[in-house]
Amino acid sequence: MKYDLLTALTVAGLHLDARHQISTARLTLLITARYNWRLDEFCVGQRDLARMWNVTERTVKREIKYWLEKRIVICKRQGVRGKVGAYRLNYAEIYRLSAPYWQSVGPDFQERMTETHPVKEAKVVAVDFRNKGTTPQDPVAQKDTTTWRAACQRMKDLHPEHYRNWIALLSFGSDDQETLALTAHNTFVAHYIQTHLMPILHEAVEATLGPRRRIRITVLT
């Protein structure tokens, strides 16, 4: 998966504009040299990156900001009080960005990437399986300030169809900073989300609530 991910990232960068090509070259070097695959993050100081890329620290700051804006990486921990921030690759966004260019690498690569795509497009028609009187209210529309609401807003903005058809059917249960508990109103919805949409959930939760939360989906009984 590591080599396929690097291939996808690089082929996208080479087919896009010059700004993206330079950014991809820098990110690829960082990944091959310093990415911690066990923790799924890179945690490298700006001075070290400036020396690695032969640029100024100001350029490093702009580059990381660019990655965050393009959603290529996700901030896991902010760098505060002299501590270095930690970031991880956004696999779903790298797949989406590189998908138009997979065939340029070869049919075997395209087939492999299609099979392992973390968020495949839904091939089934969304069906309303909710019982009358049990329709959950869209968390984004609610006036409460639950931690789940911020994640929902992000998914609604980035993945409106997935959110509308599936994720909006989940109800917030609890969040103890370690586990985010959600409830589905039937087994079909729970199973579909767990099978197809967990990368979307994890990305939104990490981006808005912080890293290392488990997501548990149970069925309302």
Image (spheres, grey):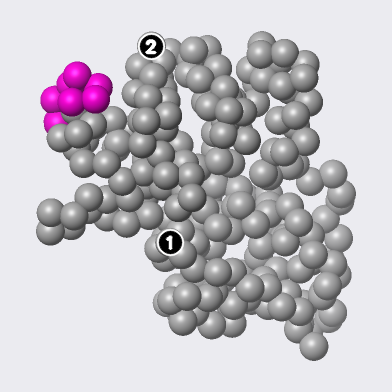
Give me the C-alpha separation between circle 2 and circle 1: 32 Å
Near-viewer residue (126 or 184): 184
The image shows residue 127, relative to residue 29, as above or below, that is below
Residue at image x 40%, y 63%?
Answer: 210
Quadrant location of the C terminus in the rendered image: bottom right
Q: Earlier in the sequence, mark 2 or mark 1?
A: 2
Left-right relation of 82 to 6: left
Residue 137 position within the rendered picture, expressed as x and y whole percent measured from the top left: 64, 75
Residue 139 position within the rendered picture, expressed as x and y whole percent measured from the top left: 56, 71
Query: Which residues lie in the magenta part?
Result: 51-58
Q: Amino acid at mark 2?
A: Ala
Say if the magenta span includes residue 54.
yes
Residue 126 position within the rendered picture, expressed as x and y whole percent measured from the top left: 83, 55
Quadrant location of the N terminus in the rendered image: top right
Residue 49 position within the rendered picture, expressed as x and y whole percent measured from the top left: 23, 31
Residue at image x 55%, y 69%?
Answer: 214
Say if the magenta span includes residue 66.
no
User: Which residue in the structure is indicated by mark 1?
Assistant: 211
* Furthest-bottom residue in this view: 221
The image shows residue 197, relative to residue 149, as above or below, that is above
Q: Residue 134's quadrant in the figure?
A: bottom right
Res 160 visible: yes
Q: Amino acid at mark 1?
A: Pro
What secondary structure is found at the residue carrying circle 2? helix
Left-right relation of 175 to 98: left
Residue at image x 59%, y 69%?
Answer: 215
Q: How many marks?
A: 2
Res 88 visible: no
- The label on residue 18 is 2
Residue at image x 31%, y 46%?
Answer: 43
- The label on residue 66 is none
